[in-house]
Image (cartoon, rainbow, N blue to C red):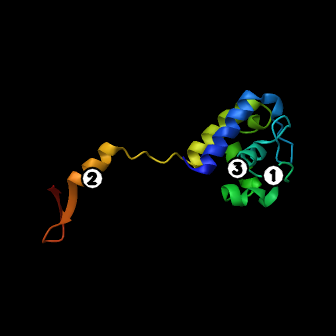
Amino acid sequence: MNEVRTAILKAADHIENNPHEFLYKEVFVPDCGTPGCAAGWIAHFMGVKFGTPCWGTFLMPILGINSNVFIDRMDAIQFYHWRVDAQVCAATLRHYVDKHHPAEAEYSEVSKELDRIFKEVPCEQGSTQTKVS
C-alpha cells in the first residue's frame, strides 16, 4: 500500500475513533490530543511536524494538489457535512482515497505463474500467439 493511501486511511480511522480531535477550521498540523482538520491529520500521519500550517500549497508535496482542490474533491463526495461531522469526514476520506489514491492490485503468485506459463510470442505474420512453456 502506498504511503499517501496509508496516511489517508490512518487519518480516517483516527478521526472516526477520536471525533473530539477533529476540527475543520484548525489550520495547523495536529498531534495526538490536539484538534486537527482532515488535511492536518493526513499530514500528521505522513510525518509532518506538529504545528506546521496546513493551508494553500501545503498539500502539494503530500497529495500533489493544493488545499482548495482537496476541499473541492471532498465536497464532490459529500458536500459540506464532512466539515462538521467527524464520522462523515472519516467516511468521505475513505471514498476520497479509493477514488484518488486507489489500492494497487495485488499480483498473486498464481497470476505470476500463469504469466510464466502462457507467454505471448510474436507470430510470423505479426500477430501474437500463446506459447505454453
Q: Is residue 103 left or right of residue 4?
A: left
> Can you give x and y, in whole percent of width and height, for residue 2 in the image?
57, 50
- In this view of the protein, can residue 78 be seen by the observer? no
Q: Residue at x 56, y 43 (%)?
A: 98
Compute the Cα span from label 1 to label 3: 9 Å
Report which residue position mark 2 lands on: 115
Quick one: SS at disc 2? helix
Task: Name which residue lies at 87% across and 49% down.
Answer: 51
| Residue 6, placed above or below residue 61 | above
Local packing at callout 2 (Cα closer than 10 Å; few below 14, some 14-19, many 20+) is: few
Mark-to-mark CA distance, 2 and 3: 36 Å
Are discs 1 and 3 less than 8 Å apart at CB? no
What is the crowding at mark 1: few (fewer than 14 residues within 10 Å), some, or many (at least 20)?
Answer: some
Q: What's the residue type where badge 1 is placed? A: Lys
Residue 18 rendering spot, x and y as whole percentages: 77, 29
Mark sitting on residue 49: 1
Q: Earlier in the sequence, mark 1 or mark 2?
A: 1
Residue at image location 78% in from the left, 60% down from the top: 57
> Which residue carries the number 3 mark?
46
Lateral position of residue 40 relative to residue 115, left or right: right
From the image, which quarter does the C terminus lie in?
bottom left
Please tell me whether mark 1 sits on a helix, a strand or a loop. loop
Q: Residue type at mark 2? A: Asp
Residue 85: image quadrant is top right
Q: Position of residue 123 (x, y in %)?
A: 14, 67
| Callout 3 secondary element | loop
